[in-house]
Structure formats: C-alpha cells, structure tokens
Amino acid sequence: MSAFNDVKTYTGFRFITLLCVFILYAPLLVVTVYSFNASTSITVWEGLSLRWYVDVFVGPESTKFKQAAINSFSIAIIAATIATAIATAAATAIVRGGLFRARGMSLGLITLPIMVPEIVLAVATLIFFNSIGFDRGFMTILVAHIAFCIPFAYLPIQARMQGIEDTYEHAAMDLYATKWQAFRRILLPLMMPGIISGFLLAFIVSLDDFIITNFVKGAGIETLPTAIFGSVKQGLKPNIMAISTMLLGLSVVMVTISYFVSKSDNTK
C-alpha cells in the first residue's frame, strides 16, 4: 500500500482515532471504576470495596436479578444454538451450493437484520406477534432473538467456509464418500472454528439485547438488560454499575474468544 493511500498518514487521523476511542470507552471505564466504590453515592469516591458485587447476589434486588439472569442465559443459549444451526445450513447452501437464481436475494435477506435499525425490527416483530395472536412472553423473546442472531452467526461461518478449498470434499468423494459423508467428516470439522465463533457472537448479541426484548417481552418476565433498565428508572444505584461491569466483562471475554477461535487454522 502506498503512502498516498495509507489513511494513517492523513493529517488529524491519530487525533480523531484517539477521540473516538475516548468517547466510546471512557464511560465504560467510569462505570467499571465506580462499581468498586464503597460509597452509596455514584459520584462520591470513598475507597475500594466489593460490597455492590455482593449486593447483586444477596441484596434486596438479588432475587429479581437472579431470575433475570436465568432468563437471559436460557434464551441466549437456545437462540444462539438454533441460529448457528440455521446459519451453518444457509452458509453451506450459499457458499457450496453453486449458482442458483435466489442466491443473491438469499444472502441479502440473511444479512438484512444487521443493516435495518433495531427499533424497526422490534416494532415489526411486535406487530407480527400481535397479528398472529402470539401471546408475549418467554417464547416471543426466544423467537425474536433467533431471527435477530442468525446474521451474526452467519458471517463468521461464511467467512470460514469461503477460506476452505472445495478440493477437500472432492477428494473425499473421489474416495467414494457421499456428499453427506464429505460434509460431516471433512467440511464440518474444518468449519468448526467459524461455527464456534458464530455461536459466541450470537450468544453475546442475544444476552445483551434490550430494544427487541423490551418490545416483545410479556408482563412478569425480565432479562438482565430489561431488569437493569427497570432499576435505572427508579434511580441509578451502585449495584447497577456492578451488574453492568460483569456483563461488560463477559462480553469482552466472549468476543475475544470468538476472535481467536475464528483466526485459528485447522486446515493444515
């Protein structure tokens, strides 16, 4: 790449980059630091303490947060599993299925939820459930999350499959393997880093989702994001910062694992 095309050589590039990083991560850093504050105030620092992390598990609101966490993790695991299975099948059809008439349209439909504003998806999903008479509750959240998570699972799976030459499958079929055997014993193991990466991304997207969940959830059911939002409406308390920090830490760990798994190479 020539210096003329290298954006890092443009005047102000470093300043703008640092400014964007500061705007994105400074609030997260503040929340993390004050989650260890011993004070009951969210603005007055009185020293390091884990009292608010303990409060999350044994405090007055612990029962609500525990049930919300159970709902969140249950929905995220089921939604990520189903979305990953659908995404794997879709990637196999689009990448390995050859040219077919609806190939471009299929790819566009799969990736469309990423480009459409989430509030639009939330309203559309709510209208759909109301039109078919589907009572809002655990199942409506699960169905909505499955649909929303498919493109996030699909992209790393597709990228992984595109990096695998089809000569592996052709060699297996030359040795009298059926297409299913070539897929199950050759292609699927090679795709596994992409599948795991897609699952982890879908899981964290489902776990952290608020907008769609808030629209389609029924009365009496909460996930961690909606439970946090409900508590914040009554006033910002330090235990909310502790929960937010734990969710942030989990998200960072999952995304990091997803990144390294997707970069692994088991084709050698």
Image (cartoon, grey):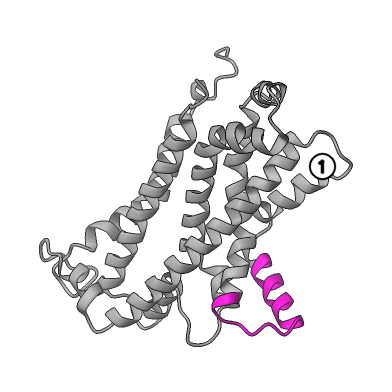
Residue 105 vs 143, above or below: the answer is: above
Give left or right: position of 218 versus 65.
right
The extreme top residue here reads 2
Question: Which quarter of the picture shows residue 72?
Answer: bottom left
Residue 189 vs 62, above or below: the answer is: above
Residue 79 horizontal/vertical position (percent): 55, 62
Give left or right: position of 9 versus 235.
right
**What's the residue at 82%, 42% (across, down)?**
103
Q: Is residue 215 visible?
A: no
Residue 93 horizontal/vertical position (percent): 74, 42
The extreme right residue here reads 101
Q: Residue 122 lies in magenta, yes or no?
A: yes
Q: Is residue 75 visible?
A: yes
Name the one closer to the observer, 225 or 87: 87
Q: Residues within 10 Å of mark 1 (few under 14, many from 20)?
A: some
**What's the residue at 52%, 38% (across, down)?**
192
**What's the residue at 57%, 14% (across, down)?**
1
Q: What type is the residue that disc 1 sits on?
A: Arg
Residue 48 horizontal/vertical position (percent): 12, 61
The magenta span reads 120-139
Question: Which quarter of the picture shows residue 104?
Answer: top right
As helix, strand or loop, the secondary structure at mark 1 comes to helix
Residue 101 horizontal/vertical position (percent): 89, 42
Residue 127 vs 100, above or below: the answer is: below
**What's the residue at 47%, 31% (across, down)?**
263
Q: Which residue is mark 1?
A: 103
